[in-house]
Amino acid sequence: MGFLSGTSLIPRPHKGFYGWRMIVFASVALALTGPGQTVGISVFVNPMIEELGISRTEMSTAYLIGTLIGALALPWIGQAVDRFGVRRIMALVGALFGLMLVGMSLVTNIVGLTAGFIGIRMMGQGALSLVATTAIALWFTRKRGLAMGIVSAAGGVGMTMIPLAGERLIFEFGWRNAWLIEGLIVWAVIVPMAILAIRNRPSDLGQHVDGDLHAPTDAPEVWGVTRREAMRTAFFWLVTLAVTATGTLTTAVIFHQIDLLGSRGLTPTQAAANFIPQTIATLIATLGIGALADRISPRAVLITSMGMLAGGLILGTQVSPGVVAVAFGMLIGGSGGAMRVVEATELPRFFGTLHIGAIRGIVTGAAIAGSAVGPVLFAIGLSVTGDYSAILLISSAFPIAVIVAAFFVRTPRHGAPDAQGEAHLIHEA
């Protein structure tokens, strides 16, 4: 049997449901996407601009191109997860992500920088995040919302530590060695964890989804509709639009937050401190929405997330030091945390998990593309009007439109899956 096969000598069901350990592993993987996330890259921007002799515009353009091109690969990465399993793809992605981070330490010009951004955005922010959260969808059904909330919260906390660690590494060893060290850490943690600890699905250990000891033996372990069928439903596009709105607008706000809040009377220190209520709200939303997602209508959860986003953007036009600034940060952070759980739980609920990698690859790719465009749109709005108010108000129309659409879009229904787990949508109700 190959070293990346699905079976192992890990304890059987009477030793405990392995899905809870998968939550820990997925949280670690999600945290280590940090070097490829905007927050992790941000601490490298100034020292790289200074040493490479490039302008901030050139740096931003390289980042934009890298993010957009990196997002294009995610649909195929999602298909690979469905075909080869979480375990093999996580090991491969971890190896490539580490390689790309090491490559960033060798950058000498704008071309190499752009290529590096393509690699770390594709493998870090995109692929590793997609694989980690998809793994949870395969181990949980009834408790999927709770499990995803825990992973998103724990992974998010770990992710916030990455820029702090990166800044310290840059101070001690320089930015080139900092990239190198981050790459070595990804290799040392993700690749061994994928090979030795990750398991594709419960049946690899003789277990059942959710740890159910009395699951029917004649039902397929996983079921699902194809990506093509999912994309024919209005519900798929509703979720995609909601995720894209969140990725585009929260990234834009975070990218320009110091300047935005500074224009409203906050000092740079106060503006930076606003990340604290954002982080707190993200944790509350991921855990709270995660627990509720298993019990309430997906429509209500999605509307709640979009409502927080629209409210935060509108409040951003009236921000002032104090309580209003804290409320602004919490609405923006809460909307991002809530939507992360919505996407990861509702798509498997209605489309199954047989082809969930391919389905989520499209949605994740759209969100990442949006995160590349958002900061540019806000910068254009600022240059045209001289203030952030207009672009904030215009942007709020996006989540409001999604809320309106949510009242009319019906949720999918499917027929019984066959012996291979294939199901077909029969209508939307």
Image (spheres, rainbow, N blue to C red):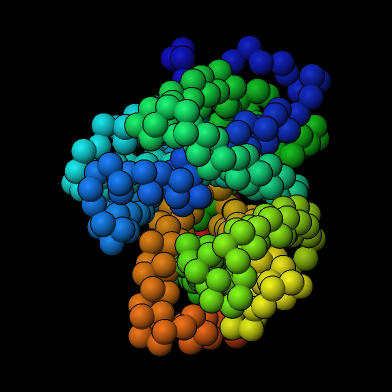
Q: In this view of the protein, which residue sits in the foreground, 72 or 392?
A: 392
Q: Nearer the viewer, residue 414 or 6?
A: 6
- At x 54%, y 51%, the residue is 224
Give coordinates of residue 400: x percent, y percent: 58, 83
From the viewer's perspective, is 365 left or right of 140? left
Rendering coords of residue 174 (x, y %): 39, 31
Residue 380 visible in image: yes
Say how many tags the image has. Answer: 0
Please identify the quarter of the rendering in which residue 138 is found: top right
Residue 93: where, in percent of width, then height? 41, 33
The residue under the point 53% across, 24% down is 189
Can the viewer see residue 362?
Answer: no
Query: Which is more toward the observer, 375 or 357?
Result: 375
Kindly indicate the quadrant of the structure image that contains residue 132: top right
Who's the residue at 47% across and 34% down the image? Answer: 171
Q: Quadrant of the C terminus?
A: bottom right
Residue occupying image coordinates x 47% and y 62%: 255
Q: Is the residue 230 above or below the residue 195 in the image?
A: below
Residue 140 lies, with reference to residue 7, above or below; the image says below
Q: Position of residue 314 (x, y in %)?
A: 61, 83
User: Relative to 353, is 378 above or below?
Assistant: below
